[in-house]
Structure formats: C-alpha cells, structure tokens
Amino acid sequence: MEKKVVSEKDVEMSVFADRWSKELLADRKTGFSLGVAEYGAREFGTPQVHEDQEALYVVSGFGQIRLDGEAFDVRAGTAVYVPPGCKHAARATGPEPLKVVYAHAAITS
C-alpha cells in the first residue's frame, strides 16, 4: 500500500442491522485493513467469521464482545484480539453506541 492519509468523514459508510462501519485503509495484496465501526444495537447481530486475524480497540461507549459464544464486557480503552475462524459479534450496553477501531491482518507463516 502506498502512503495514504484519509479522514473518517470522507469515507462512505456501510450500514448493517447492528452497526455501521467505514473501511478507512485497505491493501488487498497484503490482507491489511483498518476501519471504524459503531454498534448501536442492544442485541448481538449475526456473528462474523473470517480467515484473517482481527484486533479491536474500543474508543467510546460500553458494550459486550462475544467470541465463540463467550461474552466479554468492554469499554473505552479495551483491546480485543479475534483469532482466525472465531465467531464474533458486538453490542452496545450503555447509553451511547459502542465505537471501535478495527484492524485485519492476514496470517503469515
């Protein structure tokens, strides 16, 4: 990926039943991506599963992250690692949405 500077406000939003997200940076060749998502739903949405690894960092709000059926309480300042093949979902539990920054990276040997 070439050097790039992008503002969240300039990126198109994808809307899902439980959240919206914006993919801020992506390099399909290396499998790296960085984005932001906001979960407004109070119930867990359909679990996501992917072959790469993912890290989440909560920037605001309170919520829960479910990893392979086990729920973990999260709040601003919490980091989460999601290994490849792990079913995961998130939901807000506080008065405001749960906002996270996420990064995906391919598994290398």
Image: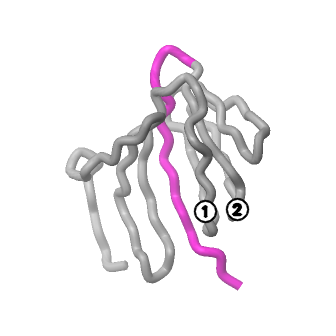
**Residue found at x 60% / y 62%:** 50
**Callout 2 secondary element:** loop
Q: In the picture provided, is 10 more to the left or to the right than 41?
A: left
Depth check, front residue: 96 or 42: 42
Task: Identify which amino acid the numbered label 2 is placed on.
Answer: Gly
Percent from the top left, x then y, of residue 79? 64, 45
Percent from the top left, x then y, of residue 16? 41, 41
Give, as a single range, the part of the protein colored magenta: 94-109
Please give the residue where the numbered disc 1 appears in the rendered image.
Answer: 50
Q: Earlier in the sequence, mark 2 or mark 1?
A: 1
Depth check, front residue: 49 or 92: 49
Q: In the picture provided, is 22 more to the left or to the right than 10?
A: right
**Residue found at x 44% / y 59%:** 34
Please give the residue where the numbered disc 2 appears in the rendered image.
Answer: 85
Q: Are marks 2 and 1 in contact (CB under 8 Å)?
A: yes
Percent from the top left, x then y, of residue 6? 27, 58
